[in-house]
Image: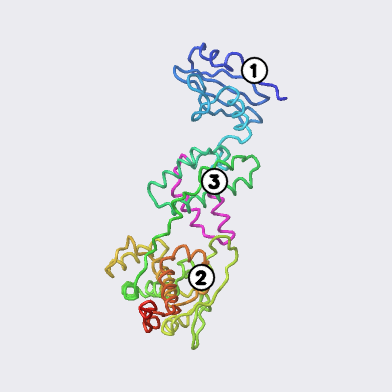
Amino acid sequence: MVQRVRAQNIESRSARLKLKPRKKPWFVKIKRGLSLGYRRTKADGSWIVRVTKGGDDWTERIGTADDHDPAGIGDILDYDQAVEKAKEHANIGKATGDNTVGAALDRYEADLKTRGGDVNNAKRVRSCVKQSLKAKVVGRLTVAELKEFRDGLAEKMSAAAVNRICVAFKAALNLAAKTDDRIMNRKAWADGLEAISDADVEPRNVILGEAQVRSIIASCYRHSPELGEFAEVAAVTGARPIQLERLQGDDLQRGKAPRLMMPSSKKGRKKVIKRVPVPITPGLAQRLNGRAGLLLLQPWNARVRGLRFADCVKDAGLDPAEVTLYALRHSSIVRHLLAGTPIRVVAVLHDTSVPMIEKAYSRFIADHSDDIARKALLETSAEIHQFPNKEATQS
């Protein structure tokens, strides 16, 4: 049995309240190089951890004492809880930069880059995390503060967007825990960054008619040949922007049935880029012929491209707040569904899965299946009405 650390002057509430308020804490030694301190104030006192070991000398506040309110509310700790919290803090160490949330996000971005993943996943999280949270030690994160972060995002963006941020954030923190055995609080982000269930509602994808798509492409060509080609290939293939950015000149296959060997997006658990043949029109193949290196020239980054595309959408008489490059992808998927392309083929051509298509485009699938089912309906009314009613004949 572990012997209790005794300190008669601070281990009980009544003893602490008899002390006079002062700035200098009362300390009790927990073990060599580690002490717990109590600072008495006119209101609630506070618990302090002090580490003096191997030249690593530091102190830090670890919670509020249960001088007036019961332990377990917020960061209020009783004496025994403060002793254990002091041990945890000493084990994890003080915030040095390498063990903080900010450093974890930096390592996550570097890891994504090494594995060929989308580094924007890390950048999106970093842009949402305040500096105060970046400075916190990963091993001391709590459910409450991470839940506060998640709920704060939910006030500014959709549930689906919040969930995407939280998934990437958890990936960064899990990577930190894998490389640091001192981090024992994975439950903090498992619970604090839990997915918002409202995101399960069917997403609102913007679907454009063919005339609207052509109008946007024409507007993009008026802006620049590069933006026009990018928009046209996006509309014809339904590929994600990241896939289009990876297209090489030799991915174009000409002939009577031209196609592009479209690279995968490495979305989800995919680790290796695979290429799938996606048909394109002869006219588009002719315009793209003869390119070396990158197939689609892009003299701008994704952000600038998005801003210029928004201007073209506005010129086409549509709302850029609703219509993004992804509207061309959604429209391509629905166009294939309504044309009778099997869902499995649609999924392969658009680098996604059948369940995802069924979830995101269920309304259009229902319309399509209704048209198909009606072709198989048995018509009976004509035959039935050729015969008189049996009861009427007997009478």
Q: CA distance from mark 1 to mark 2?
A: 66 Å
Q: Badge 3 is on which residue?
A: 103
Amino acid beneath label 2: Ala
* Label 3 CA crowd tier, 10 Å (few <14, some 14–19, many 20+): many
Residue sticking out furthest to the bottom: 256
How far from the left and from the top, in percent, is residue 64?
A: 50, 25
Q: Is residue 105 magenta?
A: yes
Percent x, y of residue 152? 41, 44
Residue carrying label 2 = 347
Q: Is 47 one of the magenta-colored residues? A: no
Query: Which of 377 and 188 lies nearest the eye of the viewer?
Result: 377
How far apart marks 3 and 1 lie (CA) works out to 38 Å
| Sequence-first disc among 3 and 1 | 1
Q: In which quarter of the view is residue 131 placed?
A: top left
Kindly state the secondary structure of the residue where label 2 is placed: helix
**Vertical side of 169 occupied by 89: above or below:** above
Q: Which residue is mark 1?
A: 6
Label 1 secondary element: loop
Magenta segment = 103-132
